[in-house]
Amino acid sequence: MMGRHHALSGALVWFGVVGVGLGEVSHPGEAIAAAAACGAAAMLPDIDEPGSTVAHSLGYISDGVSKITNEVCGGHRKASHSLIGVAVVTGLTWLSTINPISAAAVFAFLILLAFRGLAPVGFRHGLIAFAVAVGSGVGVALGRIDVMFLPVAVGVGYSIHLVGDMLTTGGVPLLWPWKKHFSFPILGHTDSGREKIFAVAMLLALGGLVYISGIWHGIPNVSHIEHNVTNFTHHISGQIKKGRL
């Protein structure tokens, strides 16, 4: 699957579990942050591919890490695309949460990566994405943002990536170092027409989950905007019924 499709699948699965599956979200900001982190983590396994979105996320730094990972893992869709990869990355994420500075750095990177994969085209790069990522990191460092969810979100997102790649041709060596690739290629090759249709379906599902959960009611000004839109809609409907429009 393409990087942005992986990110969408991670956000969808996380938000579905937290926003709907568990019934109640403690705070909308936390739910959105966790979904963004999970979506970003769903792109991480492709760090073994120098041409991937995650490899270009931090310029020369991520590009260098990508090349090293590609060598260490033996190429694309090798060690990093396995249960061992899930365990290693989840473990490192958990270790990062022990120290607020390292937790802040990891969280800021995930938020920046989430912009690359989930934000509209005009917001994927540039000052807005950088400012939000840095602000999020500062919030964690100062203790304003609780990221205890981070290891779970990263573990889930990373695992969802493997599931997504198993749905395409080639599959993944889930039980590496055993070289057998597991694959159920119902989506065909990467970036196929079927995958694009699947991505649209995921986007619609995510929008539906956001609507069903009512999470936006906890975001400042959104309820007020919704109230005004509802009143305007009722006004227009009344005018139509009276034959004035």
Image: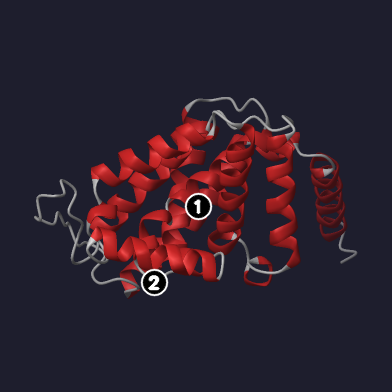
Q: Residue at x 50, y 52 (%)?
A: 40
Q: Position of residue 198 (x, y in %)?
A: 38, 62
Residue underneath mark 2: 50
Alpha-carbon distance for marks 2 and 1? 17 Å
Q: Position of residue 41 (x, y in %)?
A: 46, 49
Q: Residue at x 61, y 41 (%)?
A: 33
Q: Which of the 4 quarters of the picture holds residue 199? A: bottom left
Q: Residue at x 70, y 45 (%)?
A: 136
Q: Amino acid at mark 1?
A: Ala
32 left or right of 197 in image: right
**Neighbours of disc 2 within 10 Å: few (<14), some (14-19), many (20+):** many
Q: Residue at x 54, y 32 (%)?
A: 97
Q: Position of residue 86 (x, y in %)?
A: 32, 43
Q: Is residue 235 visible?
A: yes
Residue underneath mark 1: 40
**Neighbours of disc 1 within 10 Å: few (<14), some (14-19), many (20+):** many
Mark 2 or mark 1: whose residue is earlier in sequence: 1
Q: Position of residue 105 (x, y in %)?
A: 61, 46
Q: Quadrant of the C terminus?
A: bottom right
The answer to which of 33 and 201 lies nearer the viewer is 33
